[in-house]
Image (cartoon, rainbow, N blue to C red):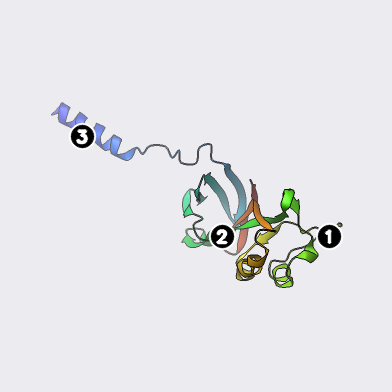
């Protein structure tokens, strides 16, 4: 009887123990964390991105150890979910730099006006186009405006700006550089 009880105890213990999550160990560009307060409750957010050569990047977002999002950027990273702290939403926008031959930034006045307006592209003092956020609104004009420029202008992703809000309050807003 003692052997059966011991075996049952061991089996029940091993069934409860899960292996550690190592999917984002040494992830590049990495994991970032933030602690904030939403609706009077503490909120700890962990946002991880792991780039994979020739494949969509992997994402995992946790709020107070609840997985808010786990997936890839095969499509735009945007998510909503109800968690115990309230309604949560978030996502990432690519930060794009437009470069011409020789990795030089493009002059703002060389870009189509609908691209500049739709993507809110600004210039520096020398008139060079600055990196801009490829938001959902920008997506509507980006591809059609860029088509005639391909070959002369190359869009280069330099970073991702990611945010999470809980109950309408921003609890995470950070940039992942590449």
Query: In this rendering, would 22 be left or right of 31?
Result: left
Q: Earlier in the sequence, mark 2 or mark 1?
A: 2
Residue extending furthest right?
125
Q: Residue 95 at x, y = what percent?
A: 66, 56
Residue 116 placement (x, y as % from top left): 73, 68
At horizontal 74% and vertical 71% (from top left) the residue drawn is 113
Residue 8 circle label: 3
Mark-to-mark CA distance, 3 and 2: 44 Å
Q: Nearer the viewer, mark 3 or mark 2?
A: 2
Per the image, label 3 sits on a secondary structure element best described as helix
Residue 156 lies, in percent from the top left, at: 65, 53
The residue carrying mark 2 is 90
- Please tell me whether mark 1 sits on a helix, a strand or a loop: loop
Name the quadrant of the C terminus: top right
Quarter that holds the N terminus: top left
On the image, the x and y values in percent for residue 62 come to: 51, 50
Closer to us: 23 or 90: 23
Q: Are marks 1 and 3 in contact (CB under 8 Å)?
A: no
Mark closest to the chain's N terminus, 3 or 2: 3
Residue bearing the label numbered 1 = 127
Query: Is residue 95 shown above or below 145?
Result: above
The reply to whether residue 134 is in sight is yes
Q: Which circle, 2 or 1, is nearer the viewer?
A: 1
Q: Residue at x 53, y 59 (%)?
A: 77
Left or right: 32, with 11 as reference point: right
Kindly indicate whether the residue at mark 2 contacts the one at mark 3 (C-beta within 8 angstroms): no
| Disc 2 to disc 1: CB gap under 8 Å | no
Which mark is nearer the camera, 1 or 3? 1
> Horizontally, is 164 left or right of 16 in the view?
right
């Amino acid at each position: 009887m003692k052997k059966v009880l011991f075996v049952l105890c061991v089996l029940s213990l091993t069934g409860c123990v899960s292996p550690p999550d190592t999917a984002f160990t040494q992830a590049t560009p990495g994991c970032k964390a933030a602690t904030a307060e939403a609706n009077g409750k503490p909120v700890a957010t962990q946002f991880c991105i792991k780039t994979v050569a020739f494949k969509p990047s992997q994402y995992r977002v946790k709020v107070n150890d609840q997985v808010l999002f786990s997936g890839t950027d095969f499509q735009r990273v945007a998510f909503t979910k109800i968690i115990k702290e309230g309604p949560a939403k978030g996502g990432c926008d690519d930060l794009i730099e437009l470069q011409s031959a020789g990795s030089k930034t493009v002059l703002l006045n060389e870009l189509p006006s609908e691209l500049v307006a739709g993507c809110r592209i600004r210039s520096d003092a020398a008139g060079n186009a600055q990196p801009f956020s490829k938001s959902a609104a920008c997506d509507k004009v980006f591809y059609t405006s860029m088509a005639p420029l391909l070959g002369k202008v190359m869009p280069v992703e330099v970073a991702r700006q990611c945010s999470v809000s809980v109950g309408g309050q921003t609890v995470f807003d950070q940039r992942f550089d590449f």
